[in-house]
Image (cartoon, grey):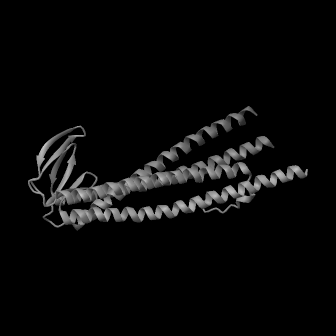
Amino acid sequence: MASTGTKIEDLSLSLNRLQNELQDTVSNRQRLETQFQENKIVKAEFDKLGDEAKIYKLVGPILLPQDNTEANMNVDKRLEFIEDEIKRCEAKIETTQTEIQTKSMELNALRTGVAA
Amino acid sequence: MSQGKRVDLTTLPPEQIVEFNRQVRSEISHLENSMRALYTAKAKFGECISSVDKVVDSKGQQMLVPLTSSLYVPGKVKEDKKFLVDVGTGYFVEKDAKDAKSFFSARIQKLESDAQELNKLLVEKDQLSRRINDILRQKIMDQENANVAS
């Protein structure tokens, strides 16, 4: 029965690893969401501006004047990028969750087998 | 709860109820932290509005400009009609006093509605935690009664 014991150990180890992974991805997802919201606010603000409005970008400690259209494009690109990242993150969360489910089911089956 | 699975708490063993309550409590403290963050942000925007009010129409006025938190240099207001407003992610936009103030008030309003939502959630969670505690107490009492009876 030693093999079942090591199997259980292996399974719970990988289960632990998966759970940590899930936690990391979830917090990653949250970070992306914050960035997404912030960029959306910036975009909404840019949309309200007239053509003659001056936009600056903070680079290190200095403010650099920026071209209006360029700034708009930058934010659009960033939004797109973040959206893609969010999708990737969510897919990963889902796969990790199903993996955790199958692993924990396996583990439970093994444990009840040992107990019986 | 979040899995949409309905479980009757009274059927659970006390250890699981305690664990569940601990979870709810940690959610509550997380929400409380967010609430505090919202209030600090709101206060910050409020300060921005009063700063705009102080600088507008004060051309030539002397002031001390902080270079670091412990080093100030004397300066004069040269431009009292235009303000650079941080709109987020490192972008700053030039606005006049009216637009700058309305930008900050819009931010404050948004934060206020967020805070209200958060508060609703907090109250809900608090009630949930209290209900869990009640059930737990009932359980323990039942168990003690059973022990006495046997």
Report how many numbered discs are placed on residues in the image: 0
Image coordinates for residue A62, horizontal then vertical, percent? 18, 45
Residue B13 to residue A47: above or below: above
Residue A34 to residue A8: above or below: below
Which residue is most to the front? Answer: B62
Left or right placement of residue A25 versus residue B59 in this view: right
In the figure, residue A77 lies in which quadrant? bottom left
B27 and B65: which one is in front? B65
In the figure, residue A66 lies in which quadrant? bottom left
Image coordinates for residue B106, horizontal then vertical, percent? 31, 65
Which residue is most to the top? Answer: A2
Left or right placement of residue A6 versus residue B121 in this view: right
Image coordinates for residue B31, horizontal then vertical, percent? 49, 54
Residue at the location (17% across, 45% down)? B65
Residue B10 to residue B68: above or below: below
A88 and B47: which one is in front? B47
